[in-house]
Amino acid sequence: MAQTNINIRMDENLKKQFDAFCSEIGMSMTTAFCVFAKAAVRQNRIPFEISADSDPFYSEVNQARLRKSIADLKAGKGKVHDLIEDDDE
């Protein structure tokens, strides 16, 4: 099978952490990326869950508040506020 090279840009600290992790489990970063690529192709999806749970914007509480606010606006229950500009910027 022919081999090819790829270049990946990532944060330097993340690279160091990932390299250390790969070393701890006995594989190179190249092997880890190949394992990921093979699993993605085989499953036809990213082979792990990607979640925004750590971002409070996506929390269920905030999403419910946003849905309620949108419904209120559509029902004409919105409030008009004056725009306050910050002259310090």
Image (spheres, rainbow, N blue to C red):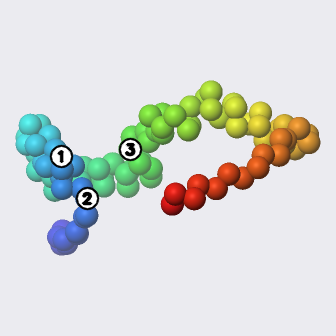
- Horizontally, residue 10 falls left or right of residue 73, namely left
Mark closest to the chain's N terminus, 1 or 3: 1
Q: Is residue 28 among what the camera can see? A: yes
Mark closest to the chain's N terminus, 2 or 3: 2
Residue shown at the point (56%, 38%) measured from the top left: 57
Task: Give 7 or 57, whichever is nearer the viewer.
Answer: 57
What residue sits right under mark 2 in the picture?
Answer: 10
Front of the two marks 1 and 3:
1
What residue sits right under mark 1 in the picture?
Answer: 18
- Horizontally, residue 30 falls left or right of residue 35, namely left
Task: Give 37 or 75, whichever is nearer the viewer.
Answer: 75
Image quadrant occupied by the N terminus: bottom left
Q: CB under 8 Å between callouts 2 and 1?
A: yes
| Image location of residue 31, percent across then percent down | 16, 52
- Horizontally, residue 55 falls left or right of residue 48, namely right
| Image location of residue 2, percent across then percent down | 18, 72
Residue type, mark 3 in image: Pro
How far apart are labels 2 and 1 at the CA level?
10 Å
Name the quadrant containing residue 72.
top right
| Image location of residue 64, percent across then percent down | 69, 31
- The kind of secondary structure element at disc 3 is loop
- The kind of secondary structure element at disc 1 is helix
Q: For mark 2, does the 10 Å Cα neighbourhood hold few (<14), some (14 to 19), or many (20 or more) residues? A: few
Residue type, mark 2 in image: Met
Task: Give 22 or 73, whichever is nearer the viewer.
Answer: 73
Residue type, mark 1 in image: Phe
| Image location of residue 49, percent across then percent down | 43, 39
Q: In the rendering, which numbered label is found on residue 47?
A: 3
